[in-house]
């Protein structure tokens, strides 16, 4: 059965009003019509099963037949701060890390970030990444859509590290330990509020690594190979899924 997203404010009593791109996708792409059955999720923990009672290119109305509260499933309580990569690599990071259960994605400006965007372009990128997170959530049957935060500066993020149960930086350092060792040593569980920092192309500078360590951020190694930013992001989320297994099912 086809699955779509509606913000909670468009769900009223026994009706769901789908507008814009979602309505266009239903009507023009999926070619669904009156009496077709659909599933709609609200980005929280509810799924609605119903039938289309009005179908147009700009608006589709669904009559709710059934409401189901859905467990959040394997969501990792992780804020992933990623040094901005070039090109459309961030699109891939948002899509795949959404599929892997990350809670929040924070685009990060560091000393070695290779792209510079004005405010208008940043807003457009954030808007696109939010849309990618929504579409990925629909595809992977995820209930909660991860938050895509506004662009943050490195210094601002490491100052906020104390607000997390654990803050970890993936980097090259003689003091860095592998993730599985860190998780076992610190007895990190799925419910712990985590921040993991991934560097841009070229990684974090030595000054940034030193500053992180001084603020109590744990240094982590992702192995001997140099990974691309997008590979490192997906790798970290995959490792966390493996470590936690079914603990947060």
Image (cartoon, helix red, strand yellow):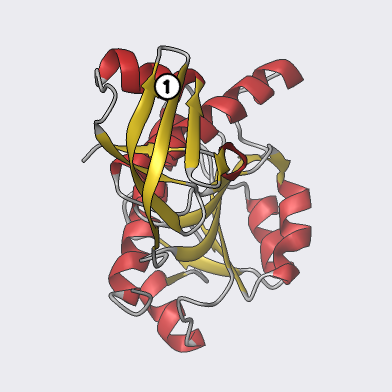
Q: Who's the residue at 51% across and 77% down the image?
A: 191
* Front one among 179 and 151: 151
Find residue 70 and report its horizontal and vertical position in percent: 39, 63
Find residue 171 and report its horizontal and vertical position in percent: 50, 56
Residue of label 1: 23
Find residue 106 and report its horizontal and vertical position in percent: 60, 46
Location of the N terminus (image quadrant): top left
Find residue 195 and report its horizontal and vertical position in percent: 58, 62
- The answer to whether residue 95 shows anywhere in this view is no
- Dividing the picture into quadrants, the one containing residue 138 is top left
Q: Regarding mark 1 in the picture, which secondary structure is present there? A: helix
Pointer 1 local density, CA inside 10 Å: few below 14, some 14–19, many at least 20:
many
Location of the C terminus (image quadrant): bottom left
Q: Is 155 situated above or below 162?
A: above
- Dividing the picture into quadrants, the one containing residue 94 is top left
Q: Who's the residue at 38% across and 75% down the image?
A: 248
Count up the numbered dots: 1
Q: Who's the residue at 78% across and 50% down the image?
A: 156
Q: Is 157 situated above or below 19?
A: below
Residue furthest toward the left?
Answer: 1
């Amino acid at each position: 059965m086809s699955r779509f997203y509606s913000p909670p404010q468009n769900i009223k009593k026994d009706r769901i009003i789908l507008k814009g791109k979602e309505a266009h996708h239903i009507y023009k792409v999926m070619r669904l019509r009156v009496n077709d059955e659909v599933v709609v999720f609200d980005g929280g923990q509810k799924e609605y099963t119903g039938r289309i009672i009005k179908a147009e290119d700009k608006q589709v109305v669904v009559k709710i037949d059934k409401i189901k509260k859905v467990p959040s499933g394997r969501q990792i309580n992780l804020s992933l701060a990623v040094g901005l990569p070039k090109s459309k690599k961030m699109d891939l990071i948002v899509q795949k890390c959404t599929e892997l259960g990350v809670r929040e994605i924070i685009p990060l400006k560091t000393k070695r970030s290779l792209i510079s965007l004005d405010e208008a372009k940043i807003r457009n990128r954030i808007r696109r990444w939010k849309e990618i997170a929504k579409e990925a959530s629909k595809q992977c049957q995820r209930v909660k859509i991860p938050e895509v935060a506004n662009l943050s500066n490195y210094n601002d993020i490491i100052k906020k590290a104390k607000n997390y149960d654990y803050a970890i930086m993936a980097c090259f350092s003689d003091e860095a330990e592998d993730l599985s060792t860190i998780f076992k040593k610190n007895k990190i569980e799925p419910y712990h509020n985590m921040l993991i920092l991934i560097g841009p192309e070229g990684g974090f500078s030595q000054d940034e690594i030193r500053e992180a360590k001084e603020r109590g951020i744990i240094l982590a190694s992702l192995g001997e190979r140099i990974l691309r930013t997008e590979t490192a992001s997906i790798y970290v989320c995959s490792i966390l899924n493996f470590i936690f297994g079914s603990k947060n099912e």
